[in-house]
Amino acid sequence: MAVKDKLSAGGGWFRRHWLLTLILAAALVAAGWWLYGRQGEKQNIPPVKADSRVLAEGIVFPVRYAQMVMPVDGTVGEVLAKEGESVRSGQPLIRLVRQDYAARVSSARADVARAGAAVEQARVNLADAERELARQQRLVAAGATSRQQLDQARTAAERNRAALAQTEADLATQRSRQTEAEGLLDKTELRAPMAGTVAYLDVKVGEHAAVGTVLVRIADESAWEVRSDDLTELAIAKVRVGDAVALTFDGIPGLEIPGRVKFIRPFGEKKRGDITYTVTVAPDRWDDRLRWNMTAQLAITPSR
């Protein structure tokens, strides 16, 4: 009897709350359907393909450029160009203080003049000695002089020939020194080896210019390229000349320029603990905001 009363009570509860029961049942069915649909969606997601491109970092370079150093030591006397200026081939850019070098040239020229005068005198002396030798030979033939006189004339002629050879050698030495001094004087003036724009000039009047220090960089801004020495042995094996490259730049977000692999240096160098190879990329177009030495990111699509 107690059980029957409990069932009657439960049935009464369901009759009173039938709407709530219906809503809960519908919610459970909907949740089950949604979970099943999500599983179906996951099963239909296509697999992600791995990026097969070769990635590297490079630097922007002009195709043609010159880096200039002073070939001789000295103090800068004149700076004849400035950064951003267009220059022509052969145009003077920097001139050292030249007094010491000019003094060496003057001294060398004086030495050449003295050596030249000595040669002329030696030639005169030799001519006199040869005439005397010829005279003594004639006298000996006529029996008008002794054999000793002829031998003395012959010795004098030989001595003067040797003296002439010595003075001529000394003249050649002095001329060589003059040429060297003039060459050093000429090297005190740094001239542009090509037409272009002065991209870098790191020297002022009065400063010391050391041999081998880069003082000026000139760029032909009509053509640019990107070089990367960031490709390891594993990466370079996938790359061929002509492969497509996407270039992006750290300094200009959003800029992407297409290009092609132009050159692969055959020789590998040890850098950062790996053997790496240098790749040069020729861009299909250019952006005037880009500058020499800017950092570029390369994404190379291997052709095979």
Image (cartoon, rainbow, N blue to C red):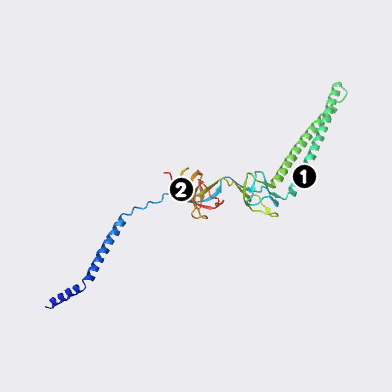
Reading the image, the residue beneath label 1 is 106
**Which residue corresponds to mark 2?**
300
Callout 2 secondary element: strand
Instruction: Indicate the amino acid at tag 2.
Output: Ile
Give x and y (percent) for residue 289: 55, 52
Q: Amino acid at mark 1?
A: Ser
Q: Position of residue 300 (x, y in %)?
A: 46, 48
- 131 versus 292 height, above or below: above
Give me the C-alpha separation between circle 1 and circle 2: 61 Å
Instruction: Return the residue nearer the eye: 76 or 43.
Output: 43
Q: Mark 1: which secondary structure?
A: helix
Tag 2 or tag 1, which sits nearer the N-term?
1
Mark 1 neighbour density, 10 Å: few (under 14) some (14–19) many (20 or more): some
Foreground residue among 292 and 10: 10
Residue at horizontal 81 percent and vertical 35 percent from the top: 120
Residue 173 on image: x %, y %:
74, 39
Give the residue at x 72% y 43%.
Answer: 182
Q: Residue at x 73, y 49 (%)?
A: 98
Q: How many marks?
A: 2
Name the front one of labels 1 and 2: 2
Q: Quadrant of residue 125?
A: top right
